[in-house]
Amino acid sequence: MANVLLEFKASAGDSEPQNRPVLIVGQLANLQQINWTQVKGKLQSVVTKEIWQAALASLNPNPTDSCPLYLSFAAVAALPSRVSRHNSPSSAHFLTRLVRTCLPAGSNRCIVVNRDRLLKIQPLGNELGITPTIIRGEELKQKGFGGIYGVGKAAQHPPALAVLSHTPSGATQTIAWVGKGIVYDTGGLSIKGKTTMPGMKRDCGGAAAILGAFKATVKQGFKDNLHAVFCLAENSVGPTATRPDDIHTLYSGKTVEINNTDAEGRLVLSDGVVYASKDLSADIILDMATLTGAQGISTGKYHAAVMTNSEQWEAACVRAGRSSGDLAHPLVYCPELHFSEFTSAVADMKNSVADRENAQSSCAGLFIGSHLGFDWPGIWVHVDIASPVHAGERATGFGVAMLLALFGQASEDPLLNSVSPLGATTAKTASEDQMERDCKRRRLV
């Protein structure tokens, strides 16, 4: 995976596009205010003032547009001038798409991760002064983690539950982030086909986002107790693989009849959230996962799907998404109507729905929440990032910024305090009102 270095400088400086490719990007009105002398150091001797002016004149963002200045080494691109209330004012998605289009990262393959490599949680713990808790292999079975163990028991590398804990003095509440870390998902005996299995190396996107967010959050300073819980397994095929019709007892004590081994993420996460409640005494539990293909149908390619037992936190997730650029939109939370999809004659529940046309993503989230209990008094948030976690064949890193913004009220960083929807008034800001007015005035083309 390409290494990226971000540098923030007061001036642009000089460089040759052949040696350091350049993309100049912004809203068209702002680009038109740039003086040639401000950018020529990045473009000469291959781009003239006349080419620069002609490129600006050709831009017609609808919603974006770009123009090459010199082969693939230099380009100028325009962002949307307005955004709707369900988009981020930063136009983060458009920005990253333009960067990817104009300056391709090359042919480096994505990182391939097995369970042992993801357990490089240990070096991060050392860096932060934290000793991880790791439960793996047969110990999971002995301690009752039937979900994680059942999913990963057929793989070459044994499954594991790993926990990083930040426990500062003076903390007033305990927060747990639970990540789905399926390092590869074949579907198990309910095996995926040749078109749906490629890309399943990204099925650990939830755990990866939580690992990155935990590091950033702790390094910035965090006033509350924060636990990162990683549910790690490879959903593989082998002689000991879980079979449809098997019944597993999860960490909650509830029994689950397996009717689809490719609905494995909810099994490992159910163990994870119950561990967060029982063993970590968490007041707030958030799980993040590449859980359902139906997420992309429910909320699209750019918005994560959010389900929670708290109306306040539902709104907060949407606001955090807009402020961070990791967009989110609510799913229906209605267990009294949807949870019957998991009815089993021989266990407390099945692991996959009876009717795949009835709110699949909502039902998958409800399966996880049911192991906490729908009357659990704490805050539970489920975030399905199956679609926004990747763009084409590459991972996006979705989720890190969202978590930093959502929980920014407990950060020691003033910028994160300011963007946190839970630390600020719930009233709409002037900029949000302006965006809604702009959206209503926009002419459809």
Image (cartoon, rainbow, N blue to C red):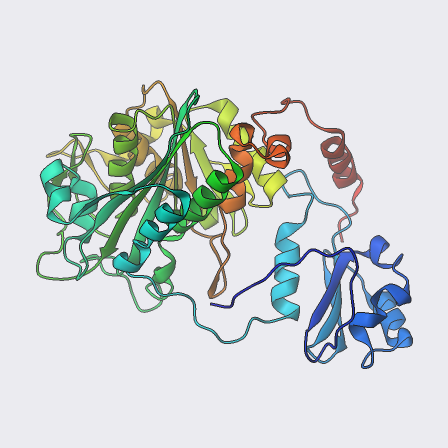
The residue drawn where x is 80% and y is 74% is 43
The vertical placement of 34 against 264, above or below, is below
Q: Is residue 332 visible?
A: no
The vertical placement of 10 against 323, above or below, is below
Q: Say which quadrant the C terminus sits in.
A: bottom right
Percent coordinates x, y for residue 257 in the rendering: 15, 40
Observer-nearest of 347 and 91:
91
Percent coordinates x, y for residue 57 in the rendering: 87, 66
Percent coordinates x, y for residue 166 in the rendering: 39, 34
The vertical placement of 11 against 427, above or below, is below
The vertical placement of 131 against 366, above or below, is below
The residue drawn where x is 23% and y is 41% is 351
Observer-nearest of 280 and 299:
280
Question: In which quarter of the view is residue 168 placed?
Answer: top left
Q: Is residue 304 visible?
A: yes
How many numbered circles are shown? 0
Q: Left of 430 or right of it: where is 252?
A: left
Question: In which quarter of the view is residue 36 placed?
Answer: bottom right
Q: Left of 189 or right of it: where is 407?
A: right
The residue drawn where x is 29% and y is 43% is 132
Percent coordinates x, y for residue 190 in the rendering: 21, 57
Question: In which quarter of the view is residue 281 placed?
Answer: top left
The residue drawn where x is 47% and y is 67% is 1
